[in-house]
Image (tube, helix red, strand yellow):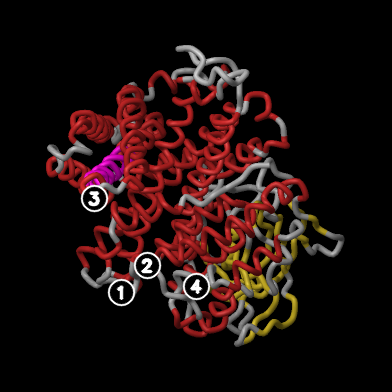
Amino acid sequence: MPSYKAPLDDVLFLINDVFPLDGYNHLDAFAEVTPELAGAVLTEAARITEEAFAPLNATGDRQGCRRDSAGSVRTPEGFAEAYGAFVKGGWVGLATPPDYGGQGLPYTFAAIVNEFASSANMALAMYPGLTQGAIAAILLHGTAEQKALYLPPMVSGAWTGTMNLTEPQCGTDLGLIRTKAERKGDGTYAITGTKIFISAGEHDLAGNIVHLVLARVEGAPSGTKGLSLFIVPKFMAANGGVRGARNRVSCGSIEDKMGIHGNATCVMNYEGATGWLLGEENRGLNAMFTMMNEARLGVGIQGLALSEVAYQNAATYARERLQGRALTGAAFPAQAADPIIVHPDVRRTLLSIKAFNAAARALVVWTSLKADVARQATDEAERQAAEDHLGLLTPVIKGVLTDIGFDNTVKAQQMFGGHGYIVETGVEQFVRDARIAMLYEGANGIQAIDLVGRKLPRDAGRAMLAFFAEVSGFLKENAAHDGVQPYVAGMKTALDHLQDASMWFMRNALGKPDNAGAGSTDYMHLFGLVALGYMSLRIAKAAADKLAAARAANDDSATGPMEARLTTTRFFMERMLPETAVRLNRVTAGAEGIMAMPAEMF
């Protein structure tokens, strides 16, 4: 059976040494956050995910969710109890304002807990994760009455939430939505239509489910401009979390999926269900994007999370599996064979996953801190810079972390040889579960087009130029630093590749949009490599400083982990970052070769 241990030491290193939280104590959520408090909160998060979530991952996958003839859905055995423990600890409302029963801690903490929970049991973690997205949308766009009615029971976890976008005839192209909303004359709307692929659409974990549904009010404009967002609860709600009559919304079926079997992915039928407008009419997409942006960051975290748990199990197996001898001679002559960790190609594979995990986790923490700044900063320039960062990096995090995260689960499976193909080892589940992250919340090709077509040119490239300036400034400031100096030239080259690709699009994509489409995925991954390289150097700088301090104090306990971090950075910079050259060549090849073949020849 697979195992999982939350990477607590790595996270604490990030928030204490790489991105020290005391640099954010001018924000309300950080005002009382000390290293001791952060350590206590995240230690407990590690414990509950390791002890309550992880043991149910394999059994939840085997059992899946079951729908009865009445449309009710039962989650796998143990899920309700584990969810109850999570709710009791106040984890759903970790980063929600205390006004609604939340703990008011930084969003960054919620992102870290999301990684732990998703590694331990991604299907189970999705139930509270989706609720947090719905909370964010109501918090930002709801009326005072709606907030008072829905937020306390959702923040407590007594009720859960969903987002309902996709329909049988449309996924990304939301302008094709047919679900209709008819004004009833009393301030409510009758919602009628069918939604598909609705994660956590129906289940037995909570007393009520608050659906946020995109629909078109009668007479509204066509396309996305005519969409509105509605609160449609499973049961009518009254203040104090009181549940009323059943609404006319039901689960038509559960999707039969490749992975995440423990999450109820439902077809939802709305048959004149009563809904309340969230935000303004015909501005539903604006309100929904509050959920979608946080959801896309959350899905990126899922890519990292599955990469992490797959790596842990592959590394353990590689240290234990005896097979053949080291190329340089028997490493353990007293044994019948050497463990496969002695082989260079095994180490290359494991280091490629480990180096990604370290850099990706840093990128998530850095971007989550920016989200906290965007939410709370009173300085307009600081807030705007944080929002620019989020807009630019969200498609990169979603697309790159899920693409590579899935690839890494396959690499981890490869470490097991034939045993990786057998259900008993558990690693094949990581492959299946990771695959969905590349598809939902906007397939990764859409993320790439969003990056190139919308995020780069926005505000005359302000966010992109700020990113370039930050990386360049870091390299200049730390050119002689022991942890950074060996890699300055390589990082400058990679940054040049990204700048060259950006300029190529400016010169060649405006008149020929297919050039942008043809190069967008490679550009997204080029951007991701540079961002991950920058994070690797931030880690190396902090690790080198801590290593020097540990040696000066004769503290042997700290030298091993810091040396490992420096070795991991070396691997990334030598073996992974040079891929930027390949990505640049693909971007600048343009669209001609891709678009030349007639459709009927495919």
Camera-side mark, 4 or 1: 1
Q: Which residue is mark 4?
A: 138
The quarter of the rendered structure image containing the N terminus is top right
Q: Residue furthest bottom?
A: 239
Residue 4 magenta-drawn? no
Q: Earlier in the sequence, mark 3 or mark 4?
A: 4
Q: CA distance from mark 2 to mark 1?
A: 13 Å
Which residues make up the magenta segment? 532-548
Q: CA distance from mark 2 to mark 4?
A: 32 Å
Q: Earlier in the sequence, mark 3 or mark 1?
A: 1
Q: CA distance from mark 4 to mark 1?
A: 25 Å
Question: Mark 2: which amino acid?
Answer: Glu
Camera-side mark, 3 or 4: 3
Q: Which residue is mark 3?
A: 553
Q: Secondary structure at mark 3?
A: loop
Image x and y of residue 77, in percent:
76, 58
> Could one spot residue 452 in this view of the protein?
no
- On screen, residue 378 versus residue 399, left or right, reads left
Image x and y of residue 399, in percent:
45, 42
Q: Residues within 10 Å of mark 4 (few under 14, many from 20)?
A: many
Q: Quadrant of residue 324?
A: top right
Question: Mark 4: which amino acid?
Answer: Ile
Q: Which residue is mark 2?
A: 36
Seen at 38% across and 34% down, the residue is 525
> Could one spot residue 409 in this view of the protein?
yes
Q: Earlier in the sequence, mark 3 or mark 2?
A: 2
Q: Is residue 206 above or below residue 285?
A: below
Q: Secondary structure at mark 2?
A: helix
Q: Which residue is mark 1?
A: 31
Seen at 55% across and 29% down, the residue is 318
